[in-house]
Image: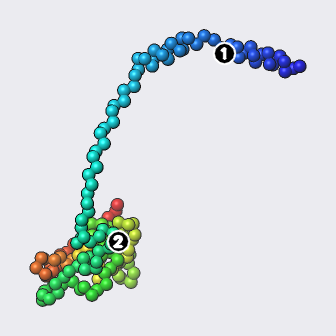
């Protein structure tokens, strides 16, 4: 019995929601008529041109290059300054000097070690006589401000010339 007054009240409230919606329908139709969407036409698809890959005499891009193509070809028959090709490459000899940063120094028993950061964010401890850089760079001197490096630069005639470079302490 108590539900009956609640049910009557609900029906009375719901009848208030039913009304004249003609002004709303008029607004929607006029708005749709005035604002017509303009969609630009699609661009014409480019014509497909078939390309025949004919490189039987070239190396496949899916096969690693042969060892002869990747190793340095150095003429050792001349009697002049040459890099030591039998020496095992150092861990920082795959980076150009531009890609290395000196981050600081450590000292132990009077020996100063340089801390060098590579582009892959690894920090290495290097001392005098160790190698870095692409041109057989050997560390000649380590100070708290810089590393002096002696590089061997090819002169084009089969000989090599020494060049001095510095890697300075970088705060960034």
- Give the camera-side residue of 58 and 34: 58
Q: Is residue 1 left or right of residue 75?
A: right
Quadrant of the image occupied by residue 146: bottom left
Provide residue 83's location: percent of width, then percent of height.
21, 83
* Residue 36 appears in the figure: yes
Residue density around tag 1, few if under 14, some if 14–19, many if 20 or more, within 10 Å? few
- Label 2: which secondary element: strand
Residue at x 23% of width, y 79% of height: 72
User: In this figure, what is the number of numbered marks?
Assistant: 2
Figure check: 49 above or below 74: above
Going by the image, does 45 lie left or right of 4? left
**Residue 97 position (above or below residue 15):** below
Front one among 172 and 9: 9
**Which SS class for mark 1?**
loop
Q: Nearer the viewer, residue 55 or 90?
A: 55
Dividing the picture into quadrants, the one containing residue 145 is bottom left
23 or 155: nearer the eye?
A: 23
- Residue 140 image point, x, y percent: 25, 80
**Residue drawn at x 53%, y 15% as measured from the top left:** 25
For disc 2, the neighbor class at 10 Å (few under 14, some 14 to 19, many from 20) is many
Find residue 61 and report its horizontal and vertical position in percent: 30, 68
- Mark 1 sits on what residue? 17
Is any part of residue 143 visible from this angle? no
Residue annotated with mark 2: 116
> Foreground mark, 1 or 2?
1
Q: Quadrant of residue 51?
A: bottom left
């Amino acid at each position: 019995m108590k539900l009956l007054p609640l049910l009557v009240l609900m029906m009375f409230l719901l009848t208030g929601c039913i009304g004249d919606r003609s002004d709303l329908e008029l607004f929607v139709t006029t708005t749709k008529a005035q604002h017509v969407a303009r969609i630009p036409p699609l661009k014409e698809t480019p014509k497909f041109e078939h390309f025949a890959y004919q490189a039987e005499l070239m190396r496949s891009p899916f096969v690693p290059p042969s060892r002869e193509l990747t190793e340095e070809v150095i003429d050792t028959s001349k009697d002049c300054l040459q890099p030591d090709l039998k020496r095992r490459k150092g861990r920082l000899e795959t980076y150009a000097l531009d890609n290395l940063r000196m981050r600081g120094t450590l000292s132990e028993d009077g020996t100063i070690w340089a801390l060098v950061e590579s582009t892959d964010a690894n920090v290495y401890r290097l001392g005098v006589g160790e190698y870095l850089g692409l041109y057989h760079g050997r560390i000649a001197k380590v100070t708290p401000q810089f590393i002096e490096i002696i590089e061997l630069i090819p002169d084009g005639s089969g000989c090599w010339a020494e060049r001095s470079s510095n890697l300075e302490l970088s705060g960034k």
